[in-house]
Image (cartoon, rainbow, N blue to C red):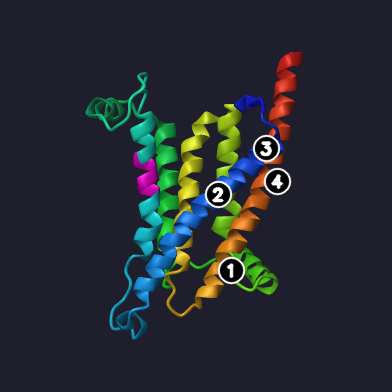
Amino acid sequence: MRCKKRENLRIKDIVLESSLILIAISLISLAGAVSEDALLSHSKYMLEMDLFRGVKLSQVGPIGITFLAYISIFGYRRSEDKRGLYWSEIKLFLSENIRVIHMAILGAIAVAAIVYISRMGHETNIEPSSLEILGRNILEMIFQARPRTKAILLAHPALLLLIFMAYKKCCCWSLPLLALAVSIGQGNIVNTFSHLRTPIYLSVYRTVYETGLGILIGALAVAILKGVWDYVQRRKENA
């Protein structure tokens, strides 16, 4: 079979490939989550003689690892084909001029990070909005185990969008942000199995629901983006 050029792949081929990748990495995360669940089945955790303190780490850790992996592969203004972390690139980054737009973006990221970390775990000072509670109630009525909104609306669809944009070579500035969003979904799978009072089959159901809904919503997002992309390309050709 003749190999197709990556940028000329049909949308259904991109969705299929990215869906298989999402399922594969979710299975890897699921294997780690089950191993974690086995360790937490110890009597000292079940009797609450000791507490599991890795909830926040399981969410923040994948984000940090993804960031370091991206910097190691692509670097900062790197022109050579090399891998690793280099002090010269760190000094170049630290010596850049800071503008107001940079501070605004950094502030938005900081606020989002504070909200994200604060809402982890069972105890939080940030209460969900009435609209979010309504959405949760609807999902609980439909599914046996409610899928998390951050997984089905952000993390899992982000992988399909990331692969589509990488193939089409569009909006490359968004690829690092999408990669970080994908890592949130994988940390979420591990975090799902850290609830000691939740039966393991419900955690499996939740993971399956999140992956399936994430693929459906991601495919819809890719289709919309593909339509916008084609429209922009036609306007450029007719200009």
Disc on res. 220: 4
Q: Farthest residue toward the top?
A: 239
CA distance separating discs 3 and 1: 27 Å
Q: Are marks 1 and 4 in contact (CB under 8 Å)?
A: no
**Residue 106 at x, y percent in the picture:** 40, 41
Q: Residues within 10 Å of mark 1 (few under 14, many from 20)?
A: some
* Residue 66 part of the magenta-drawn span: yes
Instruction: List x then y, in percent, for residue 145.
Output: 60, 72
- Contact (CB < 8 A) between labels 2 and 3? no
- Quadrant location of the C terminus in the rendered image: top right
Q: Which amino acid type is marked by label 3? A: Asp
Check disc 2 and give the amino acid type: Leu
State the separation of the CA atoms marked 2 and 3: 14 Å
Q: Nearer the viewer, mark 3 or mark 1?
A: 3
> Which x, y percent locates residue 177?
48, 40
Nearer the viewer's eye, disc 1 or disc 4?
A: 1
Point out the frontmost of discs 4 and 2: 2
The residue singled out by tag 3 in the image is 13
Q: Earlier in the sequence, mark 2 or mark 3?
A: 3
Residue occupied by mark 2: 22
The mark that comes first in sequence, 3 or 1, is 3
**In front of the other: 68 or 128:** 68
Distance of mark 4 from mark 2, alpha carbons?
Answer: 16 Å
* Quadrant assignment, res 140: bottom right
Residue 71, relative to residue 40: is it above or below? above
Stretch of the chain drawn in magenta? 63-68
**Mark 3 residue element:** helix
**Label 3 vs 4, first from the N-terminus:** 3
Residue 205: image tag: 1
> Farthest front residue?
1
